[in-house]
Image (cartoon, helix red, strand yellow):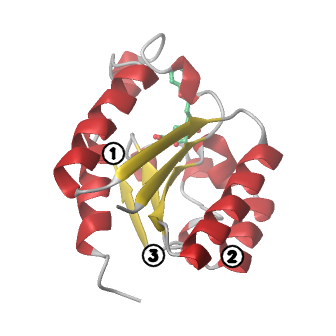
Amino acid sequence: MKTVLILNGPNLNLLGTREPQVYGSQTLADVQTLCDSACDANGFDLDFRQSNHEGELVEWIHEAGRMQTAGTLAGVILNAGAYTHTSAALHDAIKGTGVKLIELHISNVFAREAFRHHSYISPVAKAVMCGFGVNGYALAIAAMAAMQDQP
Ligand code: CA2
């Protein structure tokens, strides 16, 4: 069984504690439970992580690249949080490893402040999803399953 690696960036550990009108009221632990069920339903193992540190996220993308080479990775679902809008390092890591990656956002970033409209991740992602709330995580896992026969 292949693994879906779900990476969450800065401040997503605060999910459910503030800004419920933007991000909903579920916690990151609730999201992990949702992802567990979605992975079960789609025949994947789940590896679910969060970090507030850009370098740690870069290291995890490198790890994903090694898993992809070994044939154990289905793909990465990345909610890079605010690093989406700032991180050339994450862009380079995704491009350099060639990992199959879906960029995910809980909110519709295009309906928000202008600085959230640009993403360093989108040009190196296979697909981009935003605005579905935390249910977007389950939708992204189903999309990852549908993408498995693509190169
Ligand atoms: O909509 C998303 O998923 C975002 O990636 C969330 C990031 C934001 O910087 C992106 O533009 C869009 C922010 C995550 C912070 O989440 C919090 C949740 C509750 C309370 C405080 C922060």
Q: Which mark is residue 97?
A: 2
Q: Which mark is residue 126?
A: 3
Q: Is residue 42 left or right of residue 104?
A: left
Give the amino acid type for the residue marked by disc 2 in the picture: Thr
CA gap between label 1 and label 2 equals: 23 Å
Residue 124 visible here:
no
Disc 1: which residue:
137
Q: Characterize the local packing of mark 2: few (<14), some (14-19) or many (20 or more) Cα atoms within 10 angstroms.
A: some
Quadrant that contains the N terminus: bottom left
Q: Position of residue 46 (x, y in %)?
A: 41, 46
Q: Find the residue positioned furthest to the top.
A: 17
Secondary element at image label 1:
helix
Q: Earlier in the sequence, mark 3 or mark 1?
A: 3
Give the amino acid type for the residue marked by disc 1 in the picture: Tyr
Q: Earlier in the sequence, mark 2 or mark 3?
A: 2
Q: Which mark is residue 94?
A: none
- In this rendering, which labeled residue sits more in front, label 2 or label 3? 2
From the viewer's side, name the closer residue of 45 and 17: 45
From the viewer's side, name the closer residue of 3 and 77: 3
